[in-house]
């Protein structure tokens, strides 16, 4: 039997005759000795690991909590004991280590997230740095207080999957959505997705927390004179206008009919139909359709009460790149119908 085994056997024998209070007192004394400033060899730290581990068996939760607090900032802690305390069933015992100790690896933290309480998860959210592998699991298992805490942690890093899951979970929590939207590292495509899962009343608040976006100047740009690319050959809209006016007269001109025109590649009918709905000259809609930028077209679509499916289909019809369509979604979601109608009136007045 080696010396460590003999020591533990003797310790067990001694503890069997001690009261609980004396056991706690001895635990405090040995902890004082370990943290007293002496530099111990790895072999000596192993001995302390054994002794402190044995002394901590059966003590009260309060004593274990105090022990965890004292070891949480140790530079050379007894690692087996550290791991055991970090996975203690009581969150208050584990919390000091989970929040502060630099000696807990991601595997242990993931295990803790997957098997322990929300109190444990909240403690992990307070760590100065939290890796993607850990935040992925926190987002999966955490309840709203945990999600709020980890999103607020500037030292937390999220994977693409983690951000996607966060955005989906934000749909039922305005405070969570606001905090997610305010993160500087939130990729733009996830921010655009966030706009689609929260109430429209929240869009302005979310936008206020983001870096300035050129799309915020949408209304003023619509009223400006911009460079246009005229059609290669002038279109004759006589037939298309006649058909779409007849449809409107029978209350049969709406999003479904426009999407049908677009799916069939009938650009003239789509443009004419929107002009009829907007009660503007067809040239206004054609110019907006042909402009390099998307703002004017989106403004007209929003002004007449059409939705994103029609706006997206028009952008695809004119060959817009996927990146522009992503930007257009943010502009379209953010734009209010009243503002769009005012912008369209300004445009008509300037024509």
Image (cartoon, rainbow, N blue to C red):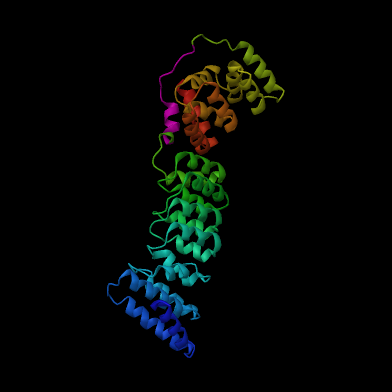
Tell me residue 183's x, y (percent).
Answer: 42, 48
Question: Within the magenta stretch, is there residue 48?
Answer: no
Look at the picture and state if 151 lies above or below 53: above
Looking at the rendered image, the quarter that the N terminus falls into is bottom left
Q: Residue at x 52, y 49 (%)?
A: 166
| Place of residue 233 in the rendered image (x, y in percent of width and height, measured from the top left) | 51, 8
**Along the horizontal axis of the image, is 143 left or right of 81?**
right
Outermost residue on the left side: it is 38
The residue nearer to you, when weighing 323 against 259, is: 323
Q: Residue at x 55, y 57 (%)?
A: 141
Across and down, in percent, residue 280 comes to 55, 21
Instruction: Say left or right for 245 vs 63.
Output: right
Q: Nearer the viewer, residue 133 or 52?
A: 52
**Farthest right residue in view:** 250
Looking at the rendered structure, the number of numbered marks drawn on it comes to 0
Q: Quarter of the image holding residue 215? A: top left
Q: Nearer the viewer, residue 235 or 259?
A: 259
The verdict on residue 217 being magenta is: yes
State the residue lying farthest toward the front: 1
Vertical position of residue 231 compared to residue 163: above or below = above
What is the magenta range? 216-231
**Residue 284 coordinates in the image, percent (x, y):** 51, 20
Up the image or down, 86 lies above or below 272; here it is: below
């Amino acid at each position: 039997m080696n010396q460590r085994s003999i020591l533990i056997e003797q310790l067990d024998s001694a503890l069997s005759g001690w009261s609980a209070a004396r056991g706690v007192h001895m635990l405090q004394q040995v902890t004082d000795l370990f943290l007293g400033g002496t530099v111990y060899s790895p072999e000596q730290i192993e001995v302390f690991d054994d002794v402190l581990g044995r002394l901590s068996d059966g003590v009260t939760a309060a004593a274990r909590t105090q022990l965890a607090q004292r070891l949480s900032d140790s530079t050379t802690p007894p690692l087996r004991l550290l791991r055991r305390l970090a996975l203690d069933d009581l969150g208050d015992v584990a919390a000091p280590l989970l929040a502060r100790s630099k000696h807990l690896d991601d595997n242990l933290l993931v295990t803790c997230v997957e098997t322990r309480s929300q109190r444990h998860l909240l403690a992990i959210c307070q760590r100065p740095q939290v890796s993607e592998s850990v935040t992925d699991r926190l987002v999966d298992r955490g309840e709203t207080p945990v999600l709020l805490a980890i999103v607020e942690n500037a030292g937390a890093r999220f994977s693409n999957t983690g951000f996607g899951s966060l955005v989906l979970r934000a749909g039922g929590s305005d405070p969570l959505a606001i905090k997610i939207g305010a993160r500087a590292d939130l990729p733009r495509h996830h921010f655009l997705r966030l706009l689609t899962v929260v109430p429209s009343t929240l869009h302005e608040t979310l936008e206020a927390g983001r870096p300035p976006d050129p799309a915020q100047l949408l209304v003023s740009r619509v009223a400006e004179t911009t460079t246009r690319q005229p059609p290669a050959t002038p279109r004759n809209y006589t037939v298309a206008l006649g058909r779409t006016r007849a449809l409107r007269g029978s209350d049969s001109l709406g999003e479904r009919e426009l999407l049908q025109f677009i799916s069939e590649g009938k650009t003239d009918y789509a443009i004419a139909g929107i002009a009829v709905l907007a009660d503007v000259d067809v040239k206004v809609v054609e110019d907006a359709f042909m402009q390099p930028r998307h703002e004017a077209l989106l403004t007209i679509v929003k002004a007449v009460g059409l939705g994103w499916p029609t706006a997206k289909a028009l952008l695809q019809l004119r060959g817009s790149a996927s990146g522009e369509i992503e930007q257009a979604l943010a502009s379209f979601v953010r734009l209010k119908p009243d503002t769009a109608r005012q912008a369209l009136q300004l445009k008509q007045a300037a024509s």
